[in-house]
Image: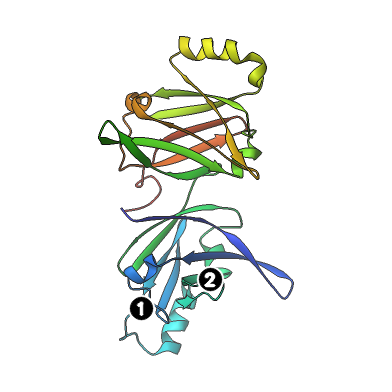
């Protein structure tokens, strides 16, 4: 399944703030979204559909009016001067009509000629699966990283317990830290948890879990995951695309 993770940002025009959604990358060309291609963006409950328009599109003015009546937008793919690759972005009414606003986390599923965008539940992030080689074969790795961790208390040097259960793994911040390292180690072993330490630099922190410890979860390498979070706690579960509104 082709997945692209993003969020609603904002654009300032004439001193006014507008919600902004931006896609960028060479993958756009792979699904027909080449430079200059016309794309119809239509709001839907909980998201937006981006539909590649063919060469036989009806008269542009008529098509534009019909799109506007649906609270949609017509946009073009272009090459970004800043990033040097393909970019597709749009602002304003179409985003608001879909019930989206600045800061919302989004997930996009794409195939040739179509990108479906859906909003993730509040305080949820998409976590792509990772993998590494273990005794000659690939094994699952779950890695959490980014500035967002620091807002939850997961900063450099912090100790974290990982508790794996069928269908989930929960990371809990242990705020006593290294002062109670021996006690935490005993607690983790007694409860069959793993004790991790947050690492990183420049406020980009990370920690990860991998290998046999994850076997009880039933997770697979090819799965995608969602992390539901609050201060001091992150719970990772398998992504249910149907519940998010994807077909």
In the rendering, at what x and y percent does residue 169 appear? 43, 28
Residue 53 - label: 1
Q: Secondary structure at mark 1?
A: loop
Q: Earlier in the sequence, mark 2 or mark 1?
A: 1
Instruction: Give the residue displayed 61% in from the left and 29% down from the top.
Output: 232
In the rendering, at what x and y percent does residue 55 appear? 32, 85
- For mark 2, does the 10 Å Cα neighbourhood hold few (<14), some (14 to 19), or many (20 or more) residues? some
Against 226, residue 157 (above or below) is above
Looking at the image, residue 247 sits to the left or right of residue 173; the answer is: left
Report the residue that reaches farthest toward the left. Answer: 136
In the rendering, at what x and y percent does residue 161 appear? 52, 23
In front of the other: 184 or 109: 184
Residue 140 - label: none
Report the residue that reaches farthest toward the right. Answer: 15
Looking at the image, residue 137 sits to the left or right of residue 129; the answer is: left
Cα separation between marks 2 and 1: 16 Å
Residue 90 - label: 2
Labels 2 and 1 touching (C-beta < 8 A): no
- For mark 1, does the 10 Å Cα neighbourhood hold few (<14), some (14 to 19), or many (20 or more) residues? some
Against 84, residue 243 (above or below) is above
Tell how many labels: 2
In front of the other: 71 or 237: 237
| Residue 71, visible in the rendered structure | no
In the rendering, at what x and y percent does residue 160 appear? 56, 25
Looking at the image, residue 136 sits to the left or right of residue 51; the answer is: left
Instruction: Give the residue displayed 52% in from the left and 42% down from the top.
Output: 124
| Residue 88, visible in the rendered structure | yes
Q: Secondary structure at mark 2?
A: strand
Instruction: Give the residue displayed 35% in from the left and 40% down from the top.
Output: 131
């Amino acid at each position: 399944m082709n997945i692209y993770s993003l969020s609603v940002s904002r654009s300032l025009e004439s001193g006014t703030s507008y919600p902004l959604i931006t896609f960028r990358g060479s993958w756009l060309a792979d699904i027909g979204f080449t430079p200059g291609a016309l794309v119809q963006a239509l709001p839907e409950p909980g998201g937006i559909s981006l539909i590649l328009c063919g060469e036989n599109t009806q008269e542009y003015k008529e098509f534009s009016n019909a799109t506007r009546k649906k609270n949609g937008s017509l946009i073009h793919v272009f090459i970004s001067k800043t990033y040097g690759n393909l970019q597709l972005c749009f602002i304003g009414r179409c985003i608001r009509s879909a019930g989206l606003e600045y800061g919302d986390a989004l997930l996009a599923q794409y195939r040739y000629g179509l990108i479906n965008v859906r909003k993730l539940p509040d305080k949820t992030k998409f976590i792509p699966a990772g993998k590494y080689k273990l005794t000659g074969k690939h094994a699952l790795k779950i890695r959490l990283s980014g500035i967002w961790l620091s807002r939850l208390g997961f900063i450099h040097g912090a100790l974290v317990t990982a508790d794996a259960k069928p269908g989930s793994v929960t990371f809990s911040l242990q705020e006593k830290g290294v002062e109670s390292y021996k006690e935490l180690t005993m607690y983790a072993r007694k409860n069959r948890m793993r004790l991790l330490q947050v690492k990183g630099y420049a406020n980009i922190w990370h920690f990860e879990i991998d290998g046999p410890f994850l076997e009880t979860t039933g997770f697979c390498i090819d799965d995608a995951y969602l992390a539901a979070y609050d201060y001091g706690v992150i719970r990772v579960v398998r992504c249910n695309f149907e519940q998010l509104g994807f077909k």
